Image (tube, rainbow, N blue to C red):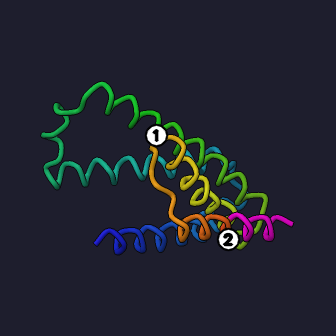
Amino acid sequence: MWWIYALLSALFASLTAIFAKVGIKGVDSDLATAIRTVIILIMAWLIVFFKGSFQSFTSLTKYNIIFICLSGIATGLSWIFYFKALQLGKVSQVAPVDKLSVALTIILSVVILKEVLTLKVAIGAVLIIAGTILLIL
């Protein structure tokens, strides 16, 4: 079931790039990111309230909150740089380079989370890195 959500995530990430490129023409990329963030904030809280997930807010530990906040900071920085890159470059180049995050995540999952690196995953990461270098050059 996880792969269905991952495919939907990829689809919407793809649409994000296309819609953003059209929407940021003549707009400061930081302003565009701020507007986008407000929309996401509203959507996320609506989902939390409609699902009734707000009740579990009190079960969050200090550890949970710290790492969720760090993730939010990383996301915000990613979006700021992504929108700036989209403003300056072609979507067909920016979006695939942004997906280098997949290979970086694989590396970091091994180093930080001590996940096991299989040969298949290692080859996939190397191919992503090679493809990204090809796109940049």
Instruction: Please state if 121 lies on the left or on the right of 25 as rendered.
Output: left
Front one among 81 and 134:
134
Span shown in magenta: 129-137
Counting from the top left corner in percent of width and height, residue 3 is at 36, 72
Q: Residues within 10 Å of mark 2 (few under 14, many from 20)?
A: few
Q: Is residue 133 above or below residue 52?
A: below
Q: Can you say which quadrant of the picture contains the C terminus?
A: bottom right
**Residue hosting label 2:** 127
Instruction: Please state if 5 lies on the left or on the right of 121 as rendered.
Output: left
Q: Secondary structure at mark 1?
A: helix
Q: Residues within 10 Å of mark 1 (few under 14, many from 20)?
A: few
Q: Can you say which quadrant of the picture contains the N terminus?
A: bottom left
What residue is drawn where x is 40% and y is 68%?
Answer: 6
Counting from the top left corner in percent of width and height, residue 60 is at 23, 32
What residue is drawn where x is 59% and y is 70%?
Answer: 124
Q: Is residue 68 magenta?
A: no
Front one among 15 and 124:
124
What residue is drawn where x is 45% and y is 43%?
Answer: 113
The residue type indicated by label 2 comes to: Leu
**Residue hosting label 1:** 72
Front one among 128 and 79:
128
